[in-house]
Amino acid sequence: METSMLALHGLGVSRGYAIGRAVVIGAAALEVSHYRIAEEDVEAECARLRAAFRAAADELAYLESHLPADVPRELGAILQVHGMILADAMISQEPLGIIRTRHYNAEWALTAQGQALAEQFAQMDDEYMRERGSDVRQVIERVLHALAEADGKPRSLRASTLAEHGDPLVVVAHDISPADMLKLRGARFAAFATDLGGATSHTAIVARSMGVPAVVALGVARPLLRDGDVVIVDGEQGVLLVNPPDRVVDEYRARQADYARERATLAALRDVPAITLDGVMVSMLANIELPEEAEAAMQAGAEGIGLFRSEFLFMGRNDLPGEDEQYEAYASVVRTMAGRPVTIRTLDIGADKELDGEATVATNPALGLRGIRYCLAHPELFATQLRAILRASAHGPVKVLIPMVAHLREARAACTALAAARHELTVRGQACSQNIQIGAMVEVPAVAIAIEPFVEAFDFLSIGTNDLIQYTLAIDRADPDVAGLYESLHPAVLRLVANTINAGARSGKPVSVCGEMAGDTELTRLLLGLGLTQFSMHPQQLLDVKREILGAHSNALRTRVAAALNRAAEIDLSLLNQ
């Protein structure tokens, strides 16, 4: 008999199809590896977990017996409670059963049981009992640490383990922070599905950069699914199918094959110049988060890097990257791009992107100390990054991009800091370009409205549509309660984009769009109609957008879009495809 299939509808934010087993995780479980073990290795894995429990128990006993005389008495009591939790069968025995029945590795089995217990504690009426959930998490973290110590280093998920030990794995979570997505990059998960999120959430951005399907804004996926459920992620329609019957699985395997053939056909456009039907040349650039993604940009035929989001070098770690480490990262991208320009955005920490150990205390972080504001408030950090970028410019063309600019004094301060960094390198005798270009992100509406002095102050501009939309419409793009109001086609947003592009054209300064609008094929013709000739997007999206450009007539689109904007009406995208 066919099982009853559950269909959850959300927002497809990364194309493609995935069929696999659900890994239902919370933030605490994101750092551990998830893989299945062979039947013959089950008892050895159980022994590994039991050894970790013994090590954790020994550590607790040692700490309790060696407490200094001046510590509060409560600390000893807490250690005793943790010892009792560690010995409880729900913690010490249930994960062994999970290993034996589901063939999970020890870390996965332990965190799966821990999450189940944490949810039980969270639902308790008694406040004291609810707080004991944190004790359970701390005990589990101690055992995880013991597992890692026994291995000599944290275990990581290898791509080969997925093929060797069963179906591909699909992450199902309530939400995934930028730092957590960074941790998941190397795990080779087949897809992502989250309760929260939108088209510009970091789950969406990173999933697209990884080339895996993703569906967000599902609402209730995480509480409804269990580890091991068979799931289908339909990134085209924004659907998550849970425990589908065989006939549906077969249908989606056929869709996967069709999608793979479509991608293979698009690959033929890699070296084809992006020229519209009426002869307008369009530059196709790539957005990257990590240095190793530069190779994917080259394989997709990118003419350069339009946005290197440098903050991902700073996140998910306990220390700041030094000048040499940053230099090596930036220089590796410059060398990979082999003479193509590389635009490096300076640190854009703030809002939903935080450095480890820096908790946000602002009432509204999106309007607080972020982007250039953060860098100017931390001048040594800023100077270190600028020196690293300048040193990388000795290997090829590099541009510096300043985020979150709102005032001309910030432009002047950034230029002064860049000049000071260049002078310091000159004193050191270290090579760097003497003509590096500096540009600004246009993502604050005030800049897009009063654009002329900013065009004059910078060498180039890059429109960050993700934040421009957020700030123009007063919508937090990370807030699920208002995600439905996030509208890239709002006339006010389009006028700000058009105003910036036109100002650049009048001054002879290049203007690109590096936000998610640039990689949305449904908006390609609209952006051409606004006069855009420089697109920057994730490498995975580049060939799809190029195909749209090759079939478009730029001048005709400009006439239609201008007419629509003059009527103060929302754009009817169907009219642009005629």
Image (cartoon, helix red, strand yellow):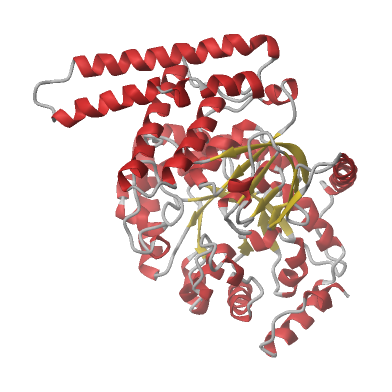
Q: Residue at x 46, y 54 (%)?
A: 352
Q: Percent from the top left, x then y, of residue 514?
A: 61, 59
The answer to whether 255 appears left or right of 75 in the picture is right
Relative height, residue 206 to residue 187 (above, below): below
> For the view shown, which residue lies furthest in the left direction?
70
Taking the image as drawn, is residue 288 in sight? no
Relative height, residue 218 to residue 552 (above, below): above
Q: Percent from the top left, x then y, of residue 493?
A: 59, 75
Residue closer to the observer: 374 or 357: 357
Determine the image quadrant of residue 509: bottom right
Determine the image quadrant of residue 561: bottom right
Q: Percent from the top left, x then y, of residue 480?
A: 54, 62
The answer to whether 204 appears left or right of 49 in the picture is right
Q: Residue at x 63, y 13 (%)?
A: 42
Taking the image as drawn, is residue 346 in sight? yes
Q: Percent from the top left, x then y, of residue 469?
A: 56, 70
Relative height, residue 130 to residue 75 (above, below): below
Residue closer to the observer: 292 or 27: 27
Q: How many marks?
A: 0
Relative height, residue 161 to residue 180 (above, below): above
Q: Residue at x 68, y 37 (%)?
A: 295
Determine the image quadrant of residue 81: top left
Residue closer to the observer: 99 or 480: 99
**If the image is split into quadrants, where does the N terminus sit?**
top right
Q: Residue at x 64, y 36 (%)?
A: 336
Residue closer to the observer: 280 or 254: 254
**If the image is split into quadrants, where does the C terminus sit?**
bottom right
